[in-house]
């Protein structure tokens, strides 16, 4: 029992100090034990590679201005490429249908006023006991109906593009307007002008597309095998245009056509150099503290929950702890404190491990 304990303690001591000492092994011993080495391969799934990407406008930063009523566009005040402020006048629409909506609103307003007067009168008559309660309830019901009708007609005018100020000015004696002014719903740039002066439009027909262009999104297509290496927060750059940002989403939906991974980055620096719909080349930085390398799976030596590779030195080998990121076929990708110029043992691992633990090495 004491021997087993001593072995476990000794093994744990060696593992804890694994990277502090070499495993001495001469070339002759390596040959006799069937030990061979191979260079460490740099993992280039993401490092130093450009990936195709498209510039898009983030959700919530784009608005489409549409015609609130059918009619004739008789004025346009802005064009594609111009910058606008929220509330800025952008177009004027002449709509005969608007006259009908205003007429209906004024009629509903008149009926509501009459119903309000009738309700006030019947309230007093009911108090004096002159009329039965049934008549009062009928008058009250009529008042409620006219109130609902007035609210409905007012909402129709809102949908037609009229603001509260214009609606409140409507009077039977002041006349009605057949035109409605359209304003920008947000600050931004006009990306597209879809109509011309003199054009007749239908209700809900799009007139302008306006968007805020900072920040922008970068939709990246990357190799599917890169999934284990990416995570939100990684630096993303567009080198040719000196733009940069961070990865914000790893979308778990593979493109069926080319089996690529869909990544999304938010560009916050240099966004003014990019345009929606533009195709660019993006670079994803894994970070200086992260170094991924490709090694043969046969080079991996597992001791408990930890994994090691044996790096060749002038005296033999040195065990280096690694973190296995992925394994595919005969290769594994690891995160390790290597520089990429080392050679590691790929055969004879058991003999090296035995020497390392003091079980069979000379």
Image (spheres, rainbow, N blue to C red):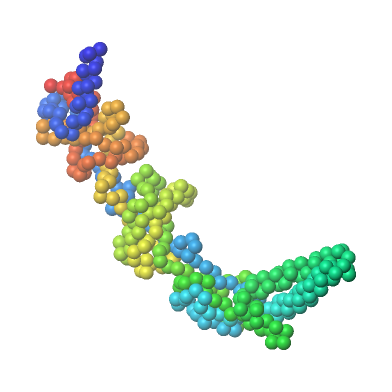
Residue 289 in view: yes
Question: In the displayed structure, would residue 190 be above or below residue 339?
Answer: below
Question: In the displayed structure, would residue 199 be above or below residue 267?
Answer: below
Residue 139 in view: no
Whole-percent x, y for residue 302 in the image:
28, 29
Q: Nearer the viewer, residue 296 or 192?
A: 192
Q: Residue at x 36, y 62 (%)?
A: 268
Residue 247 placement: quadrant: bottom left
Q: Quadrant of the C terminus?
A: top left
Name the outermost residue toward the front: 128
Does residue 279 appear left or right of residue 166 in this picture? left
Question: In the displayed structure, would residue 70 be above or below residue 47?
Answer: below
Q: Residue at x 68, y 73 (%)?
A: 154
Residue 350 placement: quadrant: top left
Question: In the displayed structure, would residue 9 be above or below residue 115?
Answer: above
Whole-percent x, y for residue 39 in the image:
21, 39
Does residue 278 appear left or right of residue 6 in this picture? right
Name the outermost residue toward the top: 1
Q: Residue at x 34, y 66 (%)?
A: 270
Q: Residue at x 38, y 50 (%)?
A: 232
Whole-percent x, y for residue 132 in the image:
88, 65
Does residue 301 appear left or right of residue 22 in this picture? right
Whole-percent x, y for residue 253 in the image:
47, 48
């Amino acid at each position: 029992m004491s021997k087993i304990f001593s072995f476990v303690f000794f093994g744990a001591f060696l593992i804890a100090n694994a990277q502090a000492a070499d495993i001495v092994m001469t070339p002759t011993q390596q040959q006799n034990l069937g030990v061979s080495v191979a260079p460490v391969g740099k993992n280039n799934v993401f490092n130093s590679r450009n990936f195709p990407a498209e510039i898009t406008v983030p959700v919530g930063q784009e608005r489409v201005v549409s015609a609130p009523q059918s009619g004739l566009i008789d004025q346009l005040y802005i064009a594609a490429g111009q910058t606008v402020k929220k509330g800025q006048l952008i177009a004027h629409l002449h709509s005969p249908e608007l006259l009908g909506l205003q007429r209906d609103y004024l009629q509903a307003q008149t009926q509501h006023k009459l119903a309000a007067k009738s309700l006030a009168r019947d309230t007093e008559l009911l108090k004096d006991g002159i009329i039965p309660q049934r008549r009062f309830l009928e008058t009250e019901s009529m008042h409620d109906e006219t109130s609902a009708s007035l609210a409905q007609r007012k909402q129709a005018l809102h949908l037609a593009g009229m603001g509260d100020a214009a609606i409140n000015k409507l009077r039977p004696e002041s006349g009605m307007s057949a035109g409605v002014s359209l304003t920008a719903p947000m600050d931004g740039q006009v990306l597209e002008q879809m109509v011309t002066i003199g054009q007749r439009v239908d209700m809900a027909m799009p007139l302008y597309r306006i968007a805020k262009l900072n920040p922008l999104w970068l939709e990246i297509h990357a190799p599917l095998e890169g999934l284990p290496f990416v995570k939100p927060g990684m630096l993303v750059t567009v080198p040719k245009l000196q733009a940069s940002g961070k990865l914000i989403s790893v979308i778990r939906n593979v493109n069926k056509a080319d089996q690529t991974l869909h990544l999304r980055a938010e560009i916050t620096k240099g966004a003014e150099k990019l345009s929606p719909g533009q195709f660019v080349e993006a670079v994803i930085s894994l970070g200086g503290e992260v170094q991924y390398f490709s090694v043969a799976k046969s080079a991996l030596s597992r001791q408990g929950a930890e994994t090691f590779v044996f790096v060749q030195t002038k005296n033999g080998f040195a065990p280096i702890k690694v973190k296995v990121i992925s394994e595919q076929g005969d290769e594994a990708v690891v995160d390790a404190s290597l520089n990429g110029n080392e050679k590691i043992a790929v055969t004879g691992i058991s003999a090296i491990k035995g020497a390392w633990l003091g079980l069979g090495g000379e």
